[in-house]
Amino acid sequence: MNYSKIYYCDIANGTGVRTSLFVSGCRNHCIECFNKETWDFSHGEPFDEEVQKKILSSISPSYVEGISILGGEPMEPENQEALLPFLLELKKALPKKTVWIYTGFTFEELFDEKKRCCTEYTKGILSTTDILVDGPFLIEKKNISLAFRGSENQRIIDVKETLLRKKVVLSPLMQ
């Protein structure tokens, strides 16, 4: 997997101070995507062990709440394969840090075996995820006043509660 960029001490892509990782590769190609350069899977730099260690180090201070993973598309199969071991290591080393994932797929699609986003890695990734911002960016539903999302169809999902209750539970951040 490649990544396009990393923002350390980011306050725009989730609550609190975070590190934001923008992965490369996306087949969704949303109209007016803000990050078209990340559609190419070979864009950017390799997400190697050195980069992963630097990210873990960046989120270890007490003032950093966690990591946000955006794209591109983190839930493309190729990206899931690379992200799962990293997220498992992150949760082992820093269990109190939060994980946000932004995806153009809906939560329901992530569990639909007919969709490319449902892989052998999906459940493992979601088990490490605290917040999932789901759904494609839709230009006709664009709303710049929304927190942490670009269009009104996108949801901010409390993944832990959703998995526990077996139904989508929206985060209070939706308001």
Image (cartoon, rainbow, N blue to C red):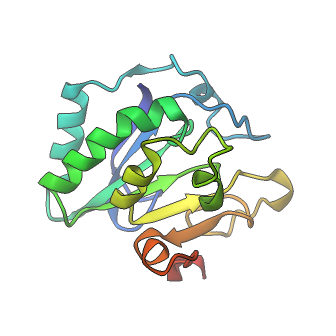
Q: Residue 68: percent from the left, percent from the top? A: 40, 52
* Residue sticking out furthest to the front: 113
Q: Quadrant of the C terminus?
A: bottom right
For residue 23, say whether it is visible: no
Q: Residue 57: percent from the left, percent from the top? A: 15, 44
Q: Residue 121: percent from the left, percent from the top? A: 42, 43
Q: Is residue 54 left or right of residue 72?
A: left
> What residue is at 47 percent from the left and 54 percent from the top?
101
For residue 122, say whether it is visible: yes
Q: Give the quarter of the image for residue 27.
A: top right
Q: Give the quarter of the image for residue 18.
A: bottom left
Q: Give the quarter of the image for residue 65.
A: bottom left
Q: Residue 139: percent from the left, percent from the top? A: 82, 51
> What residue is at 19 percent from the left and 36 percent from the top?
54
Q: Is residue 97 left or right of residue 100?
A: left
Looking at the rendered structure, the number of numbered marks drawn on it comes to: 0
In the image, residue 30 sits, relative to residue 48, either above or below, namely: below
> What residue is at 36 percent from the left and 39 percent from the top?
83
Q: Quadrant of the N terminus?
A: top left
Viewer-nearest residue: 123 or 154: 123
> What residue is at 53 percent from the left and 39 percent from the top?
71
Viewer-nearest residue: 96 or 44: 96
Viewer-nearest residue: 144 or 174: 174
In the image, residue 104 sits, relative to residue 153, either above or below, namely: above
